[in-house]
């Protein structure tokens, strides 16, 4: 990744030109360049490699109606031959071009060799190079984790990933594993994960000045979701390696926070399990007493994500963080409401919700606030327990799931919950089919604006 982006001034000139500026630009070029563009029937939009008199490349132009969008170079990096290309532009355009250039070249190549030689983008700003490489590494980390098959991304592997991250940035990690979860009162995490040979665990990372503002992230780490005894159909199970996408998101966000040395006291909690089927699997109709003391009747074993999250959220509240944010691939209902590419979020804090929305628009990582409509909480009622893990109707399923989680969060804590897809179903510039980070750039931008000195 670092070889894709260089600081300097050497390389074949690359110009990104707004459509409305193309004709004035063309009028200033030599007859040779004008003749080439005319002879090749260049339509005034897209990419053109303009040769020199010796048959080499004199310059590259890319004409677009959106020269400042974040994904402007997401396709260019895959269309140019290997070499160095120098881009002169203002700081904002350099940032977005570099960002999309690097992520446009992303390939998940753990199992399939990728020998392609990618072109290098050269820009005259060491600061932007460093910022972009940190940000794109965070996004790529999320993608890599989600793309990795479940056989190689079980709870223990998530633990190893967080241990490695802690080692890199001087953080501390504690893991509560297997029956230790019962001993230390994390019963729902244990219940969901106990059927698997891959022991369930709560992974707990802390970093930063103990006196700094406390920011706690919680990520759903269901490394594979069979649905449990309420078994998913084959089609519904095919992509369930991505059900630890919430964990991947908070790990990537934590990387960005620590690499940027944001002045916060960071805590990251990942309840990591496999929702498997065995003689020890939890059952529909079971009742569990959670860490918070609330009893929950299991209506459906395929609504396991909110079960592992509720114990982690209860623990997160013990520190009274200034901000508590969770990410989860929680409901299909959110995908029905907003599609797969727009993450929805819920928040009990008006100012924070507005901040996330605004920050997301600034960095082209849009997030959409959904309502915590309290009247729907009645749909989670149980006749024999304090609440059920599913609403009594599929309608408003993302809302009832969020209201379930809210029951485990202290009312005086600013809490936000992101329900994300974690997967691209279609190829877009800079965004291949596969694992994807949604909302973490928006959240980081908000945190940076709030806490940077």
Image (spheres, grey):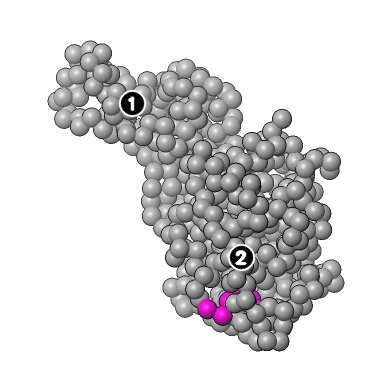
Please state if 344 lies on the left or on the right of 266 as rendered.
left
Asked if the residue under mark 2 is in contact with the one under mark 1, i.e. CB atoms within 8 Å, the reply is: no
Which of the image's four quarters has the C terminus? Answer: top right
Residue nearest the observer in this picture, 19 or 351: 351
SS of the residue at dot 1?
strand
Residue at the image position 61 percent from the left and 65 percent from the top: 402
Residue depicted at 70% across the width and 40% down the height = 258
Q: Mark 2 or mark 1, which is nearer the start of the sequence?
A: 1
The range drawn in magenta is: 388-393
> What residue did someone put label 1 on?
17
The spot of residue 206 in percent (x, y) is 78, 49
* Image location (x, y in percent) of residue 26: 24, 19
Residue 63 in picture, x, y percent from top left: 30, 30
Compared with 249, 182 (above or below) is: below
Extreme residue in the left direction: 39
> Could one spot residue 57 in this view of the protein?
no
- Main secondary structure found in the magenta portion: loop
Q: Nearer the viewer, residue 446 or 102?
A: 446
Quick check: is 306 in the magenta stretch?
A: no
Identify which residue is drawn at 37% across, 21% down. 12
Q: Quarter of the image holding residue 20?
A: top left
Picture quadrant where residue 127 is located: top right
Q: Is residue 273 left or right of residue 68?
A: right
Q: Could you give the CA–CA distance between mark 1 and mark 2, rounded to whole angstroms?
A: 44 Å
The correct choice, above or below, for 410 with respect to 125 in the image is below
Crowding near the residue tagged with mark 1, few <14, some 14–19, many ≥20 C-alpha atoms within 10 Å: many
Q: Quarter-wise, where is residue 18 in the image?
A: top left
Question: Is 268 situated left or right of 185 in this image?
Answer: left
Badge 2: residue crowd in 10 Å (few <14, some 14–19, many ≥20) = many
Q: Depth check: 125 or 59 in front?
A: 125
The residue beneath circle 2 is 402
Which residue shows up at 64% across the image and 46% down it? Answer: 351
């Amino acid at each position: 990744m670092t070889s894709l982006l260089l600081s300097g001034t050497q390389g074949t000139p690359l110009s990104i030109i707004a459509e409305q500026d193309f004709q004035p630009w063309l009028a200033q070029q030599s007859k040779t360049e004008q003749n080439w563009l005319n002879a090749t029937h260049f339509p005034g939009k897209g990419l053109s490699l303009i040769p020199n008199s010796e048959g080499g490349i004199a310059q590259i132009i890319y004409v677009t109606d959106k020269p400042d969008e974040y994904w402007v170079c997401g396709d260019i990096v895959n269309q140019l031959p290997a070499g160095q290309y120098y881009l002169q532009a203002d700081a904002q355009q350099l940032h977005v071009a570099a960002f999309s250039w690097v992520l446009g070249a992303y390939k998940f190549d753990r199992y399939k060799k990728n020998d392609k030689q990618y072109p290098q983008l050269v820009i005259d700003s060491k600061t932007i190079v460093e910022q972009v490489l940190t940000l794109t590494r965070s996004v790529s980390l999320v993608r890599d984790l989600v793309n990795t098959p479940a056989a190689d991304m079980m709870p223990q592997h998530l633990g190893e990933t967080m241990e490695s991250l802690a080692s890199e940035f001087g953080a501390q990690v504690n893991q509560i594993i297997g029956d230790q979860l019962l001993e230390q009162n994390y019963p729902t995490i244990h219940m969901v994960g106990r059927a698997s040979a891959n022991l369930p665990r709560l992974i707990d990372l802390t970093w930063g000045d103990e006196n700094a503002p406390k920011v706690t992230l919680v990520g759903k780490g269901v490394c594979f979701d069979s649905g449990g005894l309420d078994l998913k159909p084959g089609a519904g199970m095919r992509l369930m390696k991505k059900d630890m996408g919430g964990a991947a998101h908070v790990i990537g966000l934590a990387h960005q926070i620590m690499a940027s040395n944001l002045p916060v006291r960071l805590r990251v909690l990942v309840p990591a399990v496999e929702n498997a089927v065995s003689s020890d699997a939890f059952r529909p109709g079971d009742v569990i007493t959670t860490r918070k003391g609330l009893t929950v009747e299991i209506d459906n074993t395929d609504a396991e994500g909110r079960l592992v999250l509720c114990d982690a959220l209860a623990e997160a509240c013990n520190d009274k963080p200034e901000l508590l944010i969770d990410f989860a691939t929680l409901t299909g209902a959110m995908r029905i409401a907003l599609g797969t590419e727009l993450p929805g979020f819920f928040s009990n804090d008006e100012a924070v919700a507005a901040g996330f929305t605004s920050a997301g628009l600034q960095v082209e990582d849009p997030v959409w606030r959904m309502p915590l409509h309290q009247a729907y909480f009645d749909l989670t009622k149980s006749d024999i327990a304090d609440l059920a893990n599913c609403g009594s109707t599929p309608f408003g399923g993302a809302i009832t799931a969020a209201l379930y989680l809210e029951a485990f969060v202290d009312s005086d804590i600013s809490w936000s919950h992101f329900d994300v897809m974690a997967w691209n179903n279609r190829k877009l510039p800079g965004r291949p089919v596969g694992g994807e980070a949604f909302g973490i750039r928006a959240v980081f931008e908000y945190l940076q604006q709030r806490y940077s000195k």
